[in-house]
Amino acid sequence: MTAVLEVRDLSVRFATPDGEVSAVNGVSFDVNEGECVGIVGESGSGKSQLFMSVMGLLARNGRTLGSAKYRGTELVGMPVKELNKIRGDKIAMIFQDSMTGLTPHLRIGRQMTEVLVQHKGMSEAQAVKRALDMLNLVRIPEAARRLAQYPHELSGGMRQRIMIAMALLCEPELLIADEPTTALDVTVQAQILDLMADLKRVTKAAIVLITHDLGTVAGLCDKVQVMYGGRFMETGTVRDIFYEPAHPYAAGLLSSMPRLTEERSEKLYAIPGQPPNLQRLPKACPFQERCDFVHDRCATELPLLREVGPGHTKACHLVSLQNPVTDPAAPSLVVA
Amino acid sequence: MLSYTVRRLLEAIPTLLVIVALSFFLMHSAPGGPFDSERVLPPEIEANLKAAYNLDKPVWQQFLIYLANAVQGDFGPSFTYKDFSVSELIGTGFPVSLKLGLSAITLAVIIGCTLGILAAMRQNTKTDYSIMGVAMVGITIPNFVMAPLLTLVFGIYLGLLPVAGLGDGSFRNLVLPVIALALPQIAIISRLTRGGMVEVLRSNFVRTAHAKGLPEHLIITRHTLRAALLPVVSYLGPAIAGLVTGSVVIEQIFGLPGIGRYFVQGAINRDYTLVMGTVITYGSLIVLMNLVVDLVYGLMDPRVRYD
């Protein structure tokens, strides 16, 4: 398998009046051709900023350290002019908020065709034809009429479909979807997820799905990476994470999903405590304050990712959740 | 949009009526009158004068008479500029002020927007700080300081441009007053433009445009400017109305026969008809410019609906 995206030891820092804040702390992973990778984490886990930095879309006060390569080409620190040849063409991104993500004063047609004119050098007429094809692909009714409309004239679900169609115009090799269904109501969410599943089959693009919703991941992804405090806590196949979660955080996330089989009287599990404050992140294990199995080592040593099965890794000192004692062999970084 | 325009124009009539009534009664309730001066007039002459101008009647009657005449386009004779009607005074002065004001605002929009865009694109850099610093100075220096400085440097020391007057009517004579008038506007417009740009550049749709790999110039011109310039458009409406009705200070310093001076002189001399004339001119312009602003909004933002 060839990697479309190789990320090595990538960190994202933001300069704030109260000092530098680390949103992402040295993560490494590959996204291979045709693969669908889910990035799961709660708000503030750094999951969005990780890919914003790959796309060169960080806020002005943000900076990226480490490396992110698209087919061997380094993206970190690449001049914007060069980056603009890749983003939108080879790597495309879908954003969470379709309400504000489309330019309010431009017609849908213009917003779609400009991508093709820019990257493929198409004429306006060719671009319109291609835009129509894409609108049909994402199952937008009356596609031709939509091109002449403005974003505010369309429903939220329709706008998100347009975002998706826009991202697919140039047949990207990598599609990054940042919470594509979060801002939509439940029935529309289901439609969009169906659409994504179809697109996964018909396009050859590798997909990165950023979400806090494990259900979304289960339906679409091959691999899952669970993030917390800007680090990967556990990575593995969907099967690994759902049936044999090895990290207390991943297990906690799973337990906090409502299940249809549960008795109605049972109270839904919630991970205790608050999402991490990135400004005061513990030096050692970021999850220690909320972990049911916390022990002395968690406060002084940062656990590193280690294999617990083929392609299944976790960053935790525990032998396993069934046997929650520290594993002396677990690799870690002594920080205090 | 046409029916909206017509409706707004019809709505302007009661608005203007209120403006006219308020200024008329306020002005007449102020002590003194047009014929009060150091030289005390014999009572019979004063009575004759007052009778000739209807000033002997109750104020509400004077108001109705004035209104009836004004509706027919007769704004009465000026009390202090003898042998001139208010229409003549404003009719000859307004073109001068209009030319001056429009030139100034055009210059201010071109330079102000350019500087504002530059500052926003180089946000929090030396370019940004120096542009905004100069703009701040521009806003704080009053034009009665700036105008004499300009005449001194360009008119007298360098001898490049005429110091005052309309001369042969060529544009050379307007250069200095236009610059003096435009400078504070450049400062305000560049700050407004920068503010609008900075906000829109942070918005999600600009991020989408970046993610699409569009070049910087397209992101600015196509995706940012229209949304960013809305505050500038709102400001320009009343600003244009203010500028084309002239500036007392600039007209005095550069010796230009605009209508700006009538606002002040009319009020000081209790030249009732002249004050009313200037009030109606300015009021109508404000109402008109606000309508224009609302219509331009519709062109810039498709979400604006007229119904």
Image: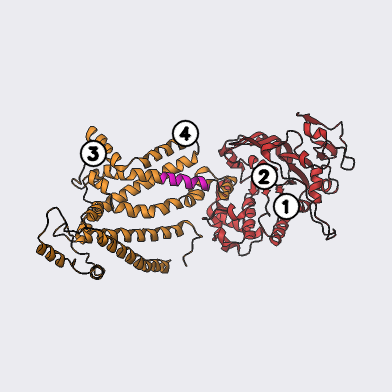
Q: Is residue A69 visible?
A: no
Which label sits on residue A280? Answer: none
Tell me where residue A27 appears, x and y as whole percent.
72, 37
Q: Amino acid at mark 4?
A: Lys
* Mark sitting earlier along the chain (1/2): 2
The colour style of the image is by chain
Residue corresponding to mark 4 = B126
Circle 3/circle 1 CB separation < 8 Å: no
Q: Nearer the viewer, residue B135 or B296?
A: B135
Residue corresponding to mark 3 = B161
Query: For the residue labelled by badge 1, is the local secondary structure a helix, a strand or a loop?
Result: helix
Q: Amino acid at mark 2?
A: Ser
Q: Residues within 10 Å of mark 1 (few under 14, many from 20)?
A: some
> Which chain can be seen in red?
A
Are discs 3 and 1 located on one and the same chain?
no
Residue corresponding to mark 2 = A48
Query: Is B195 part of what is drawn in magenta?
Result: yes
As drawn, is B10 to the left or to the right of B60? right
